[in-house]
Amino acid sequence: MSIRYDFSSQRSFTPYSDSILPTGFRYPIKYLSLSREMLYPVQFLWWFNDSTTEVGELCWRMRLHRLIDWPLSEKVDPIPFARNGELAAYFDGNDHSGDPPVFVVHLPDSVCIDRYENFDAWLAAAKEEGGIGNPPYDKISAESSYPAAAEASDGYYFCPNCYEASVPLHTYDTAILCDSCGVFFNLK
């Protein structure tokens, strides 16, 4: 039996146009690729801003009106690109490299809480936070709970179905797929 993820309804988005971006700013190539076609499970906690929507337009208009407490050495021209509840992710519009740093801001406090070297680093952390890893996404169940929880001993987890020992694929996995019987199970 193959268990698959449920995928997010967001399959693409439209970045802000060059006509309104700071002069010299270039989006990361991977970000532009995602804008054309993305297929992430619902466990990916971020939603990318779409400049063609009312929310996307509002995020752009509000980008310079909010007084954000940026890290001391940074003078950021914020370009909003993603949201996760009270968190917003911004590129630095002052960067002209095509690989700008990413800043995550906690909006209620207007405080920058994270800085990532670039979009790739931010995306890797965002995937890890949602426990999705890299494609293909049909390898791990989308269910928040699994049939049974595994007993642990010396770093190994014993499948509650066939009692075969397995280890997590990654530290952020919330479940293990038993190679012997094909059952997913929780970590205790």
Image: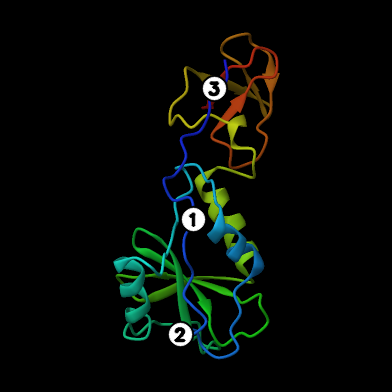
The N terminus: image quadrant: top right
> Does residue 35 sit above or below 42 in this rendering?
below
Nearer-N-terminus badge (1/2)? 1
Answer whether labels 1 and 3 touch (C-beta < 8 Å). no
Q: Secondary structure at mark 3?
A: strand
Residue of label 3:
185
The residue at 54%/60% (across/down) is 35
In percent of width and height, residue 69 lies at 41, 82
Question: Marks 1 and 3: which is nearer the front?
Answer: 1
Mark 1, other Cα within 10 Å: few <14 / some 14–19 / many ≥20: some
Q: Is residue 164 left or right of residue 112?
A: right
Q: Depth check: give the residue in front, 111 or 20.
A: 20
Residue 159, by quadrant, is top right
- Label ID, residue 20: 2
Mark 3, other Cα within 10 Å: few <14 / some 14–19 / many ≥20: many
Q: Secondary structure at mark 1?
A: loop
Check disc 3 and give the amino acid type: Phe
Check disc 1 and give the amino acid type: Ser
In percent of width and height, residue 31 lies at 59, 64
